Amino acid sequence: MAKIFCVANQKGGVGKTTTTVNLAAGLSKIGQRVLMIDLDPQGNATMGSGVDKRALAYTAYDVLWGNATLEEAKVHSDASGYDVLGANRELAGAEVELVSVDNRENRLKDAIAVVANNYDFVLIDCPPSLNMLTLNGLCAAHGVIVPMQCEYFALEGLSDLVNTIKQVHGNLNKNLELIGLLRVMFDPRITLQQQVSDQIKSHFGEKVFNAVIPRNVRLAEAPSYGLPGVVFDPAAKGSLAFIEFAHEMVQRMGSKR
Ligand code: ADP
Ligand code: MG
C-alpha cells in the first residue's frame, strides 16, 4: 500500500512544486514506485515532470469529477521515472463545481484507493491556498510535507496550516499528520536564515527533516527543460540534497511500519 503525502503550504513560491517533482524523481531513482498528482491548476508540476499539460487526454479534473479513473488518466514520464496525474487550467473549475457535490472532500481519496497497491509513494502537489482542492489532498493523505524558506515571516503562515491539519485530522481524516518541515532555498551564509532555522528546530523538533535543500540555480533551471533537477543535473548540490531527502523519507516510513 502506498504512503500518500501532500506537499502543502498556502504561500506561493515557497518551493512546493520543486519539492514534489524532485522528491518524486529522487524516490524513483532509489527504486520506489511513485505517482505524482498535480492539484495546482497552474500545472507546473506536470510540465516540470516532462508532461505537456496542453496535450493531456485526462487531468486531475476528470478524476475528481468522475469522468475518468486514475488508472485511465495517469501517464508515465519516461524522463522523470514516475507516473503523473496531470493538471491544467481546467482544474480551476473543480474548485467551484465540487462545492455542490456529494462526498466532495473525499473524491481524490476514493480515486487513489483503487491504485494504491501499485505504488510505494503518492505525492500530491497542492495549490497555494487552503481550498477544496487542497482539502481533497489532505483528506487523501497520510501526511503533509511542508517546504519552507527560513525567513522571518515563514513561521507566521505556518500556524494557519498547522491548524488546518489539526482540523482535518479531527473531523475528516484521522490518518493525517504533519510529517515534517523541509527547509528549502537555504543559504547558510545568511545569518537570519540560520537563526530562523534554529528557531524552527527548537519549535518543531523531530518534525524538522534532517535534509536541507540549498538555494541552487540548477533546480530553478530544470523546469524549463521539462525535467526535475534530480534528473537534469544529478550532481548539482540541490539534486544531491533531494536524493538525501528521498532516503530520509524511505527511512522514516520504514521505521513506522
Ligand atoms: P511553489 O510551488 O510553492 O509556488 P516553486 O517550487 O514553484 O514554488 O518555487 C518557486 C520558484 O523558486 C521557482 O522559480 C523555483 O524554480 C525556485 N526554486 C525553488 N526551490 C529552489 C532552490 N532550492 N534553489 C533555487 N531556486 C529554487
Ligand atoms: Mg507550485
Image (spheres, rainbow, N blue to C red):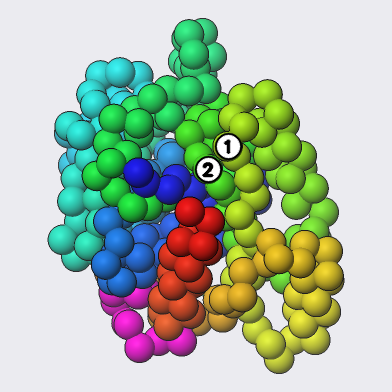
Kindly identify which residue carries mark 2: 142
- Residue 219, how many percent across, how many down? 43, 75
The kind of residue on which mark 1 rests is: Asn
Report how far apart the C-alphas of labels 2 and 1 lie in the structure: 5 Å
User: Taking 125 as reference, is 43 left or right?
Assistant: left
Judging by the rendered image, the residue that carries numbered circle 1 is 175
Q: Main secondary structure of the magenta part?
A: helix
Q: Residue at 23% of width from left, 24% of height from top? A: 68
x%, y% of residue 123?
A: 42, 50
Quarter residue 145 falls in = bottom right
Residue in front for this viewpoint, 108 or 133: 108
Crowd rating for badge 2 (residues with CA inside 10 Å; few <14, some 14–19, many 20+)? many
Residue 57 counted in the magenta span: no
Q: How many marks?
A: 2
Residue drawn 28% across the image and 41% down it: 117
Query: Which amino acid, by three-letter code, is at mark 2?
Result: His
Q: Where is residue 39? Give x, y as percent.
A: 43, 39
Q: Do callouts 2 and 1 mark residues in contact (Cβ within 8 Å)?
A: yes
Q: Position of residue 38 (x, y in %)?
A: 39, 44
Is there any visible trace of residue 220 in the rendered image?
Answer: no
Q: Which residues are magenta?
A: 229-238
Query: What residue is shown at x 61% (from left), y 25% (from top)?
Result: 172
**From what the image shows, is residue 93 above or below residue 83?**
above
